[in-house]
Amino acid sequence: MKKIFIYTLAALTLMACGKKETSVAAEEERVEQVRTIVLQPREIEREISVSTNLQGYITQNVAPSLTGKIEHIYREVGDRVSAGSDLVRMDQTQYKTTKISMANLEVEKNRIEMLLKTGSATQQQYDQITTQYNSTKEQLEFLETNTYVKAPFAGIISAKNYEDGELYGGQPILVLTQLDRLKALVAIPETYFPLFKTGMKLTLTSEIYPNKVFPATVEIVYPTIDPSSHTFQCKIVIPNAKNLLRPGMYVTTNIGLGKANAIVVPYQSVEKLVGANDRYVFIVEDGRAKRVAVTLGQRFDQDIEIIAPEIKEGVEFVTTGQHKLVDGVKVNIVK
């Protein structure tokens, strides 16, 4: 009886071990069914679109280098001004006093100059009056510029912070923004950095003018890459002679980069990492799925360009069944 019990226990133990080994083997041999394509480069018209906000090419604070009372502000917000037109008149007292002093010094300088020629005045006297005259002249020019403030360029008044009679100090009195030329900063994915050059032509579109296309030019390609966004900045310049576009307007830049060979795959085959904006795909190597992080490029309706060192011609790329895959799992390619 004891022997029978021992044999039975041994048999049960062997059966349990056998089941466990079978289960492990089954888990190790799990195979996922997928469909694939063999990647081939495709010629595309390289174009990227990036949205941004317009700015005045020049925005200047109208802020005289004099404190004191504002006698008169000639312009209101929204007024268009031409270069050299009057903007602000400050308290004129100091200017008028200095102008009188200047006139008196000019008379005295001329008198001593005549006396010097007859020997009735010394060179030292003449040098002293000349120095005083030149210093007062510089002071008068400074006061004139900052008492009667004029527009340095044509533009539009975009802000006004004072009224007539108020004491000036701190904030600019007006803000003048150039309108006939605008600029914008555009963040471009780092992938395209080698393709961007100063002087490149591009176009802008705006929802406000659905049937219009506005030309623009790349003025500066900034040389550094933002490590957090993986983008670089371009400064673009937009002619705006008709003043249709305005600072602050939201526009889309359309940048043609010529023909290029690219790897383009179905958009639905690209996965997004949960909780992040990182994208990845699966390829097949030696019968197993391999997860590859990719950068997205240009979109073409239902297809999209993907970029990564592993993504190249001849690679077996998973188009269906990728949602069930994990890195390293065995796959069976369904034709």
Image: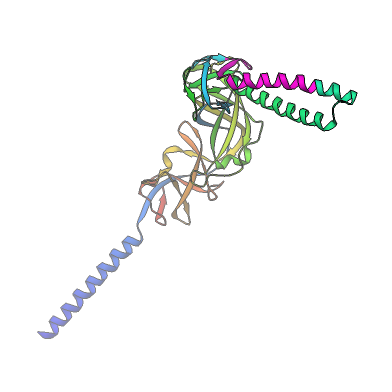
The residue closer to the viewer here, 241 or 49, is 241
Q: Which of the 4 image quarters holds residue 24? A: bottom left
x%, y% of residue 86? 59, 15
Residue at image coords 72%, 20%: 104
Residue that protrudes farthest toward the bottom in the picture: 2
Residue at image coords 56%, 42%: 191
Name above or below for residue 227 compared with residue 74. Answer: below
Name above or below for residue 290 compared with residue 203. Answer: below
Find out whether residue 193 is within the magenta segment. Answer: no
Locate residue 147 relative to residue 271 in the image: left or right: right
Quadrant that contains the N terminus: bottom left
The residue closer to the viewer here, 64 or 328, is 64
Write the start and end of the magenta stretch as one range.
Answer: 81-110
Find out whether residue 89 is within the magenta segment. Answer: yes
x%, y% of residue 330? 40, 56
The residue closer to the viewer here, 232 or 17, is 232
The residue closer to the viewer here, 132 or 264, is 132
Residue at image coords 76%, 19%: 107
x%, y% of residue 95? 62, 21
Q: Is residue 41 visible?
A: no
Locate residue 262 relative to residue 324 in the image: left or right: right
Q: Is residue 308 visible?
A: yes
Magenta stretch prevailing secondary structure? helix
Residue that protrudes farthest toward the front in the picture: 120
